[in-house]
Image (cartoon, rainbow, N blue to C red):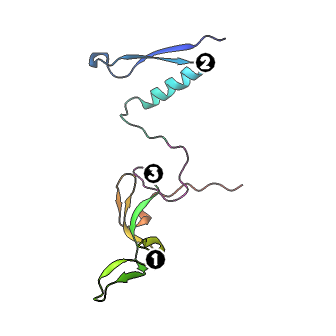
């Protein structure tokens, strides 16, 4: 069994009372890769990690891909004799009562970070993949 590589590291200045941590790695290469990440991060207070690149237009602030919008729908409803709304027809469920709808429109708001857009054309575009 190989010997573990131990890294002793402190984030922040010693004068601020930040504790020292010990991190265990299987190899020196793993330790070195971790230290490269720490070096790249030095001076920044936050970071974001992205598994996959978005394939649709996305929020330039947080890379979110879902947005609140507006949509006009035609819905079957039940009314009283004086034309007052009672419920959605037939069973009170809005989804099953919609029989026609129009294209959603803005303004738009990112569901993730709340950034607002007048038009979806303001979103960042995904990078185009090269075709072989």
For marks 2 and 1, the one nearer the N-term is 2
Give coordinates of residue 53: x percent, y percent.
Answer: 54, 49
Query: Where 68 falls versus 85 (above or below)?
Result: above
Q: Which residues are magenta?
A: 50-64
Query: What residue appears at the point 68 percent right and 56 percent down from the top-left corner?
Result: 131
Q: Nearer the viewer, mark 1 or mark 3?
A: 1
Answer yes or no: is residue 70 visible. yes
Q: Disc 1 marks which residue?
A: 98
Q: Nearer the viewer, mark 2 or mark 1?
A: 1
Cα gap from disc 1 to disc 3, whole angstroms: 31 Å
Which picture quadrant has residue 55?
Answer: bottom right
Q: Disc 3 marks which residue?
A: 63
Cα gap from disc 2 to disc 1, whole angstroms: 60 Å
Answer yes or no: is residue 102 visible. no
Question: Counting other residues with Cα less than 10 Å from the Cα at mark 2, is it few (<14), some (14-19), or many (20 or more)?
Answer: few
Secondary-structure class at tag 1: strand
For marks 1 and 3, the one nearer the N-term is 3
Secondary-structure class at tag 2: loop
Considering depth in this image, is 47 or 95 the residue closer to the camera? 95
Which secondary structure dominates the residues rendered in magenta?
loop
Which picture quadrant has residue 18?
Answer: top left
């Amino acid at each position: 069994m190989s010997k573990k590589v131990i890294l002793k590291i402190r984030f922040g200045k010693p004068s601020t009372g930040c504790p020292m941590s010990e991190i265990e790695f299987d190899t020196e290469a793993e330790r070195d890769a971790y230290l490269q990440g720490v070096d790249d991060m030095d001076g920044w207070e936050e970071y974001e990690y992205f598994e996959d690149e978005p394939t649709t237009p996305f929020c330039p602030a947080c890379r979110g891909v879902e947005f609140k919008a507006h949509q006009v729908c035609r819905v079957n409803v039940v009314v009283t004799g004086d034309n007052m709304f009672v419920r959605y027809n037939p069973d009170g469920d809005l989804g099953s009562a919609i029989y026609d709808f129009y294209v959603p429109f803005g303004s738009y708001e990112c569901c993730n970070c709340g950034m607002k857009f007048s038009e979806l054309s303001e979103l960042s575009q995904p990078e185009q993949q090269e075709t072989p």
